Amino acid sequence: MTEKEKAAAGYLYNANYDEDILNSITKCNDLCYEFNQLRPSQRKEQSVILKKIFAHMGENVAVNAPFWCDYGYNTTVGDYFFANHNCQILDGGKVTFGNHVFIAPNCLFTTAEHALDVKQRNAGLEVALPITVGNNVWIGAGCIILGGVTIGDNTVIGAGSVVTKDIPPNVIAVGVPCRVLREITEEDKNRYPICPENKE
């Protein structure tokens, strides 16, 4: 098996010396660099580059620079996806974002996990575990989402959280490690004041 095939199958693989992998990373990093040089007002030009980076990109996608991604071809984003400044996606494994996902600044999604055994680690071996983010998810500022994690639909991840295990749908989850705080309820519609003109 090639190193890419090992990574896709969930086996330990070596990303440090494989020419195919290194070329893929360089290509994606160059596209990210090109994206990051554009003016914030150049949304159309940004969109063209993002379509070259992501395996699939839905409608109405917006990403604020700087943005970095390792491979790109392992990441898919749904409709109405928004990532604020300094989003990083280390996508040695599959990273899947649903529709209406909002990502606050300084968030990291990392599928990469280095070997625990010191000889394997020093030999450059790592494993890539997938990340899945459902629909209508809001991820607060400064969050870290680790590989092997699924975040359910309609969930909010509080700022500064480190998500190490699956989070169910329809909850607020916070902390290090991230844990469910409570379910989201109808009362949450009243958490913030609504302009009278906008009330149903």
Image (spheres, helix red, strand yellow):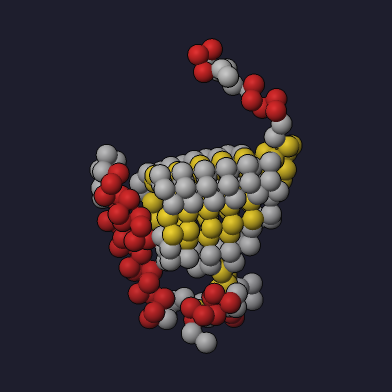
Q: Compare residues 157 and 160 and report the one nearer the observer.
A: 157
Q: Compare residues 115 and 112 and report the one nearer the observer.
A: 112
The spot of residue 54 in percent (x, y) is 41, 60
Decide if residue 110 is in sight here: no
Left or right: residue 178 versus residue 7 is right
Name the residue at 59% across, 57% down: 132
Decide if residue 66 is in sight here: yes
Name the residue at 48% across, 65% down: 74
The spot of residue 105 in percent (x, y) is 46, 42
The spot of residue 77 in percent (x, y) is 47, 54
* Numbered disc total: 0
Which of the 4 image quadrants contains residue 22? bottom left
Q: Residue furthest bottom?
A: 1
Name the residue at 58% across, 77% down: 9
Left or right: residue 151 versus residue 25 is right
Q: Is residue 84 above or below residue 88?
A: above
Left or right: residue 30 versus residue 129 is left
Name the residue at 58% across, 19% down: 200
Which of the 4 image quadrants contains residue 118? bottom right
Q: Residue furthest front?
A: 200
The spot of residue 151 in percent (x, y) is 64, 51
Q: Is residue 190 above or below residue 48?
A: above
